[in-house]
Image (tube, rainbow, N blue to C red):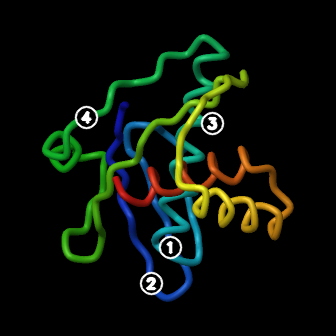
Amino acid sequence: MTYYIGILDGEDDVWGVRIPDLPGCFGGGATPEAAIADATSAAGEWAAYMMKNGYPVSAPRTLKEIVADPDVEFKLGTEIVHLIPLIINRNRQVKANISMDAGALEAIDAAAKHRGLTRSNFIVGAALEKIAVET
């Protein structure tokens, strides 16, 4: 999986993440976690759009390269660096067989039903959220 450097800043209930290697790509939210999840989604959409329209997607730079770039503003002490995974929606469904405890499956089904989601949508959403927040 490819990861890009994201720069997180904000306070209280206004947070943002900008991704210097993906020009114009950013995310926002009421919490740092929400901003990171939004940036992860935006990065995938940004890359899919670029690829669909024949534009190159730049390779991610290292933190050292980004900090040394005079065009990238980074405020040490007030901004935080976070890795943003590049997850591109391929717009095709694939079947996957997974195993889990029956009690866990019951809890997943109950939570999915409560939210009006299918089991698959719930599991994929939870997995992508975990990937976005824990990188």
In the image, residue 62 above or below residue 58: below
Choose between 105 and 44: the one closer to the eye: 105
Disc 3 marks which amino acid?
Glu
Left or right of residue 88, residue 74 in this image: left
Q: Residue at x 50, y 73 (%)?
A: 15
* Residue assigned mark 2: 11
Distance of mark 2 from mark 1, alpha carbons?
Answer: 6 Å
Label located before the other in sequence (3 or 2): 2
Looking at the image, tell me whether mark 1 or mark 3 is earlier in sequence order.
1
Q: Mark 1 points at which residue?
A: 15
How far apart in space, not on screen, are marks 3 and 2 (Cα)? 26 Å
Mark 4 — residue?
A: 61
Q: In this view, does 135 lie to the left or right of 34?
A: left
Q: Residue at (53%, 41%) from the top-left corner?
A: 99
Q: Height in image: 59 above or below 99?
A: above
Residue at disc 1, secondary structure: strand
Viewer can see residue 26:
no
